[in-house]
Amino acid sequence: MSTERLFYLPLGGAGEIGMNCYVYGYGAPGKERLIVVDLGVTFPDMDSTPGVDLIMPDTTWLEERRDRIEGVFITHGHEDHIGAVGHLYDKLRAPIFARKFTAALARRKLDEHGAPESALTEVEAYPAFVEAGPFKVAYVPISHSIPESAGLCIDSPDGRILHTGDFKIDETPVVGEAFNRALWEEVAKPGVKALVCDSTNVFSPQPGRSEATLKEPITTFMKEATGMVVATTFASNVARLKTLATAAEAAGRTVCLLGRSMQRMTQTAKETGLLEGFPNTVGPEEASEIPRENLFCLVTGSQGERRAASAQLANNNSYLGISLQEGDTFLFSSKTIPGNERGVIRIMNQLSEKGVDIVDDNSGEYHVSGHANRPDLMEMQKITQPQMVIPMHGEHRHLRELAKLSQAEGTAAIVAVNGMMLDLSGNAPKVAEYIDTGRTYLDGSVQYGAMDGIIRDRIRMALNGHVTVTLIIDENDEPLGDPWVELMGLPETGRSNAPLAEVLEHDLGQFVGRAKAKTIRDEDALDKELRKIARQVTQNEIGKKPEVTVVVSRLS
Amino acid sequence: MSTERLFYLPLGGAGEIGMNCYVYGYGAPGKERLIVVDLGVTFPDMDSTPGVDLIMPDTTWLEERRDRIEGVFITHGHEDHIGAVGHLYDKLRAPIFARKFTAALARRKLDEHGAPESALTEVEAYPAFVEAGPFKVAYVPISHSIPESAGLCIDSPDGRILHTGDFKIDETPVVGEAFNRALWEEVAKPGVKALVCDSTNVFSPQPGRSEATLKEPITTFMKEATGMVVATTFASNVARLKTLATAAEAAGRTVCLLGRSMQRMTQTAKETGLLEGFPNTVGPEEASEIPRENLFCLVTGSQGERRAASAQLANNNSYLGISLQEGDTFLFSSKTIPGNERGVIRIMNQLSEKGVDIVDDNSGEYHVSGHANRPDLMEMQKITQPQMVIPMHGEHRHLRELAKLSQAEGTAAIVAVNGMMLDLSGNAPKVAEYIDTGRTYLDGSVQYGAMDGIIRDRIRMALNGHVTVTLIIDENDEPLGDPWVELMGLPETGRSNAPLAEVLEHDLGQFVGRAKAKTIRDEDALDKELRKIARQVTQNEIGKKPEVTVVVSRLS
């Protein structure tokens, strides 16, 4: 019997939607050769990650095994799959593989971090395979909401794994490759050990709709609108950009792109030969001189992002010379991702204040999802007939639901969350090890761990405010004057109607005056007491215990 | 011609969903006698109001006219209508009116703030009227998602206003008064000058469904569930509590209430004679000994609130002796309010980790809204035939949509947001004045204004972290030692791989060493320079400009 094993280890994306990163290993335990699928990011929020710029998987485990990584395979160009390739390049220094369009996006990110040309290899689709140690990996085209998405066919000595990546079953995707059932049947034919499968839309019971169904309603919409039309969607959804722009053109509207990623995505798609028949566009200066009923602006910011073009148009009188007014129409050709509602609603209300009519995807006419719904997820299992199903790309509830559905069909399935290493060598998946995983924060120009306490302190300051207490102790260990207090994020007066800072200085001063020489000499004890009193007095005065910085200066 | 005028002035709830507060005035301009409708709160969030406990309307304008307030009329017991009666009592000291059940809820809040018994008057429904200066006010029962809701019939010398309060058209509301079309027709018969109308659900195109439609699906659900069933909804939705509890009883389940407001609401509803036929309940201790297939827990926390019973059950191994496990079912008999998605999803995933099946309102079988949908809003206009419509209880987009729909029917309508005083004396509403309005934050035990900068500083500390810089200047205006730096919410090391605090101390020390005596002597200039350098150096090191507290101690 072989002492080798085949394992699956999610480091991100399993038990959450975002920062996808999945590891496969093959070899003797502890000596497996590794491949990594995707290196994505998650976006921060004020609730849990204030001030953070990006969230990435903690790759410590991979870094410690850097010499065993055969390659990083990026399935497609969405930020939650590709977003960390630049930021983590230096830590992993592993060769990166991607198809042409995705590679063009990755190239830009790698360049920003000074990675060499050789870091990235552009690959052809199946039947081409990349040799990666004990693995052979092929990119199997699959439909999704960005061009050139691919599932991976991963051959190992223990059998074939199909890693779907993000997908939907769309036979008319407008841009890029249609879902090719025959191709997937062919890939599955030799037998599939494990289907590692997208689970995001498992709670959507109806069959998914094709991108092509949007053409007619969007064209009608563009023709019926009387003033300027603005539409927003993810810039990476190149098919949607094309549908929107060609519909606008058919309605006699000139197309203007607003927002950096709109420009970049259309340009990259054109350069890689994926976007043909896209109307000519004009810049904002030219656009502002076109009669509004002949203008269509395609803008970034479908998720309510504060700095994106949609927020700028909604929030300001004018953005790059373009301003919205009564009679204009704003189309959200997008779905609001849970957690982004407040930002999107803010924009809607700002637009409403301008008299702009808002159309969102409530009707279902102007947006379709890029992920396979429940019937399509089960269809994928029928096509590929896997020995076992491992749901990924989902919160725990999504993973669990898809596992249950698969088991109900008689297929072995398991819920594996980040850090759970599954041994796939046998006939059913079993848990081999638990790996410490976590999140790495990019904050300004620094990366640090989610558990380092930095963000915890920021959240505490946001909830409780901050008090600075300073005290000078002279050469004889006597206090020199009274403690001094500065407040930040706290009301100036409380219960006793005197300034809070003065009440604090008075009470801290009383303590210092009475304190024994031993306490004054003991740095830790003095610090602790001053902090305790500052918190207690503030609690009495305003009903809140603040964060406290104590600085005792000793003149010695 | 009369020099008197009749006005409407929203101070909260118009242009937002929450903290409802509407003022009506009648009299000579500047001398009008006033009535206030509702004194509600809004709940804070981490994005915009970290650490705040409650948000209330800014009542400065009312306080300055306190002697002219004839009364505060509370339409119903939801927190966004009644939540501030206690907190603001001392500021307004105006008599408060409410119907029996609402009064019982208000009583508790007023008691907590030491308001006298006489502060609150319990009123009967229409045809009884309360005299309030030039106004006569009657409570006209209307259906909503809490018992004893009422619209107000407000008679003034300039005509009759109907203020709907929150409502739906429900002729079988399970608990409390059914919508009585004949009654509303009767009230409208003398002619309605203005219908001030709920607009929250104006974007829901289908007719609203009755609370009674839930009975059958919920009963089936309770019978089909195999393990323990837990359901959550707003505790104030007494009709829903009854439907859930009686369905559970019919399925052979004993009912256990978890969460303070569940206890309080059922108790208040029973005491005021509104809740009959509610099954006997058991406490958690007794419940934990009942076989799980015979147990039903009705719990608080439908919006994912961190401290409520649903979060405790999801997050902990056990809560008050009750624990959830594989095979149990958790029902969200509720809709997630936009902005609360993250909290609700967190609970769902925690439940999923325990193997609990989750059922939410996606099917529409287990929840109905308490607000009138678009067809019902228009139906209300048909019933009351108002001269003008003023939408309220909505964000700008809701107000605008209802105004547009009303205008399309030939009725005068206007979008009036908080602070916009409308003169209703003529045949169409017109803007009379703009009043400064805002929000008052309750933060610990202190109330202060939203624009006071306190919360702005907290948000900045959360986004940027905090640096404390201290420096001692001796009697000769010479620096005594180097500046000292403390960090909070910032990474310890940055670009130069030395501790950030040390880099800052070094660079600040260099500045101080080189600074001219004039700069050292100038408190403001020195403070400003130290702050600037601290921000700049931190930016260089970690790519972030922090908030800075500078304390310069002068020994003189």
Image: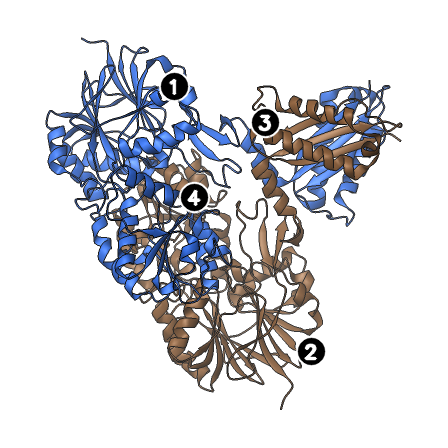
Chain colours: A brown, B blue
In which chain is the residue bearing label 1? B
Q: Disc 2 marks which amino acid? A: Lys
State the CA–CA distance, disc 3 to disc 1: 24 Å
Residue under label 4, please give it.
A342
Residue under label 1, please give it.
B93
- Disc 2 is placed on an element classified as loop
Residue under label 3, please give it.
A541
Residue under label 2, please give it.
A31
Q: Are marks 2 and 4 on the same chain?
A: yes
In which chain is the residue bearing label 4? A
Q: Disc 4 marks which amino acid? A: Arg
Mark 3 neighbour class, 10 Å CA radius: few under 14, some 14 to 19, many 20 or more: many
- Residue closer to the observer: B413 or A508: A508
Q: Earlier in the sequence, mark 3 or mark 4?
A: 4
CB under 8 Å between callouts 3 and 2? no
Left or right side of B139 for A22: right
CB under 8 Å between callouts 1 and 4? no
Point 51% across, 54% down: residue: A264
